[in-house]
Image (cartoon, rainbow, N blue to C red):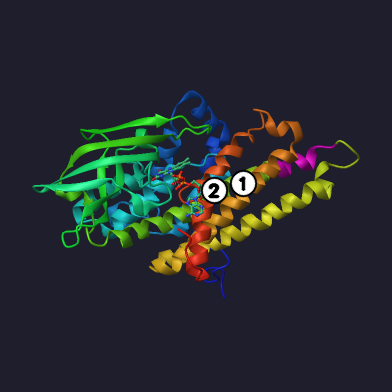
Amino acid sequence: MTVDTNPFVETTERAELRAAVAGLAAKYGQEYFRECARTGRKTDELWAEAGKLGFIGVNLPEEYGGGGAGMYELAIVMEEIAASGTGLLMLVVSPAICGNVIARFGTDEQKQRWLPGLADGSITMAFGITEPDAGSNSHQITTTARRDGSDWLLSGQKVYISGVDQAQAVLIVARTEDAKTGNLKPALFIVPTDSENFSYTMIDMELQNPEKQFQLFLDDVRLPADALVGSEDAALSQLFAGLNPERIMAAASAVGMGRFALDKAVSYVKERTVWKTPIGAHQAIAHPLAQGKVELEMAKLMMQKAATLYDEGDDWGAAEPANMAKYAAAEACVKVVDQAVHSLGGNGLTTEYGLAPMLSLARIARIAPVSREMILNFVAQTSLGLPKSY
Ligand SMILES: Cc1cc2nc3c(=O)[nH]c(=O)nc-3n(C[C@H](O)[C@H](O)[C@H](O)COP(=O)(O)OP(=O)(O)OC[C@H]3O[C@@H](n4cnc5c(N)ncnc54)[C@H](O)[C@@H]3O)c2cc1C
């Protein structure tokens, strides 16, 4: 078996992509990211350069300006960017969820209109499913689309939607009325952020992050017929096609952030000496860091399994590993960041060492895009066949 056919060894092409992304991210680094967050700027330079180099659209079809690769490669991009302390949340949303959904289910016109920009980074698309009164229960969303002639009128509210201020459009999960039953069923709409009757307000979050969260208000937003992505009748499976990539990318982001914190802690404890040897020689310091390394590597392996299955077109097969990878990566990341802060003693909480803000950033992975408990519910019900409590 050669290196390029062994699934446990990264192909030369993927290893080169990883190195190239790591090189770009290192050029910017955590200080750039934090400076943007502090001054209210966006990470536009990094986003634009990553787009120009083909990293953002690596998963999108070549005929629409993408790299023609898959989620495996986009997860490499996410992981390496996060591993340099510059985790771009919008990578989870724009090319992974929106890009995949449009590439797989959009009309040719929709693909021509949106994909080249999503691929080169000149267009960013946010994704809105969460609602104030539905939360984790996305079956309960009430944002509704009504037909008005050939147009649609969209009304409702969304909450915690990331990056709306830097996006040209939002892919909104809404509901239409089933002509036969009168029941509401999900449907996906592309809503330009400059649409009339569409407004948003920023939510104050205790996160040191240039990418912000927003509450959205849609009050009879008029959309042309072609704002609907894919079929009105198959939206659930279309949505699914976007949610597996979302979980894979959330896992990649958490693995990358965990690696970043672990690297910082390891280089610190190799040098810091308060007794006879560096503190990294004490097992109380070394073992938890070693455990973190094991847990991050295990999560990454599961993430790669999910990405491989997704790229082979096996949406259902990818669902279990995508959920498990997201769970495992988030748990490992939260634990590693906490241990990294602890390993630095007082320095772990200083501004200079930059680890303390990651205590809250790491928690995002546990809550979004789907909470730890909802993943455990999925595994309990789907993998173990246990009954539902809700
Ligand atoms: C930084 C950030 C960025 C985000 N970006 C986006 C975005 O771009 N687009 C978007 O659509 N959404 C986004 N979200 C929203 C995110 O997906 C939700 O916050 C998440 O799905 C949880 O929903 P909720 O906050 O309403 O919590 P709730 O649903 O109110 O849950 C609260 C707690 O109860 C638990 N819980 C709920 N139901 C059950 C149950 N049946 N069994 C066990 N426990 C349960 C949950 O696990 C959680 O711990 C973002 C959130 C954050 C924090």
Image location (x, y in percent) of residue 133 = 38, 43
Task: Pick whichever, 31 or 316, lies toward us.
Answer: 316
Residue at the extreme front: 389
Task: Pick whichever, 60 or 371, lies toward us.
Answer: 371
Note whether 21 is above or below 180 in the view shown.
Answer: above
**From the viewer's perspective, is 239 left or right of 284?**
left
Note whether 202 is above or below 161 in the view shown.
Answer: above
Instruction: Give the residue drawn at x 41%, y 46%.
Output: 135
Q: Secondary structure at mark 1?
A: helix
**From the viewer's perspective, is 194 left or right of 337?**
left
User: Is there any visible trace of residue 15 in the rendered image?
Assistant: no
Q: Amino acid at mark 1?
A: Val
Asked if the stretch drawn in magenta spans residue 306, the answer is: no
Q: Secondary structure at mark 2?
A: helix
Residue at the extreme top: 39
Q: Which mark is residue 192?
A: none
On the rendered image, what quadrant is the C terminus found in?
A: bottom left
**From the viewer's perspective, is 193 left or right of 89?**
left
Q: For the residues labelled 1 and 2, say whether their Cβ atoms are less than 8 Å apart.
A: yes
Q: Residues within 10 Å of mark 1 (few under 14, many from 20)?
A: many
Image location (x, y in percent) of residue 157 = 31, 39
Q: Which mark is residue 334?
A: 1
Note whether 308 is above or below 148 in the view shown.
Answer: below
Q: Amino acid at mark 2?
A: Arg
Specify start and end residues of the magenta stretch as a single range: 265-273
Instruction: Give the residue drawn at x 16%, y 59%.
Output: 179
Q: Residues within 10 Å of mark 2 (few under 14, many from 20)?
A: many
Instruction: Give the residue drawn at x 41%, y 34%.
Output: 44
Q: Name the residue that disc number 2 marks.
A: 366
Q: Main secondary structure of the magenta part?
A: helix
Image location (x, y in percent) of residue 316 = 41, 68
